[in-house]
Amino acid sequence: MEEIIIGEQDLINVICLYTADRKGIKPQDVQAELIYDDDYGFSAEVYAAGRKQVYIASNIIDAIRFWLEHEQGADPFAAALRLEMDEQLGIIAHCTY
């Protein structure tokens, strides 16, 4: 099994690619900020097309699956995905497939 660790900036880029595809806009027209809260877990504030959306953890996982399929050419549902708050690296994702 291979494991990929997706760093915080790359995770933001993944969310921007996913959002741009869904909205039919350019990835550079999307801004995202990752958030971790002890009570609510992982989320992201996403700004696109003049609107703000809040992605919960399952939306972030969907974005990673989109990236795996379209950018990495991997089976997105064969991967085990886990979000983690790392003291040094910030919010990261572990992807094992």
Image: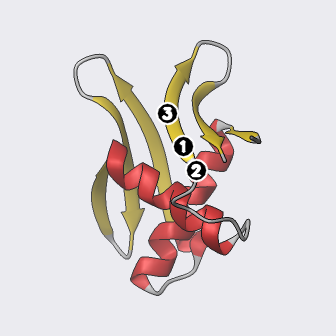
Q: Secondary structure at mark 1?
A: strand
Q: Is residue 42 above or below residue 80?
A: above
Q: Residue at x 54, y 43 (%)?
A: 80
Tell me, for residue 67, which label it has, or none: none
In the foreground, 66 or 91 = 66
x, y (%) of residue 64? 54, 55
Q: How many marks?
A: 3
Query: What label does residue 83 carry, if any?
Result: 3
Which quadrant is the N terminus positioned in? top right
x, y percent for residue 70: 64, 74
Instruction: Read off the residue under disc 2.
Output: 79
What's the distance in space between the residues labelled 3 and 1, CA to CA?
10 Å
* C-beta proximity under 8 Å, tags 3 and 1: no
State if disc 2 and disc 1 touch (CB < 8 Å).
yes
Q: Amino acid at mark 2?
A: Ala
Q: Quadrant of residue 41?
A: top left
Q: Quadrant of residue 92?
A: top right
**Local crowd at mark 1 within 10 Å, few (<14), some, or many (≥20)?**
few
The residue at which mark 1 appears reads as 80
Q: Residue at x 51, y 26 (%)?
A: 84
- Please name the amino acid that badge 3 sits on: Leu
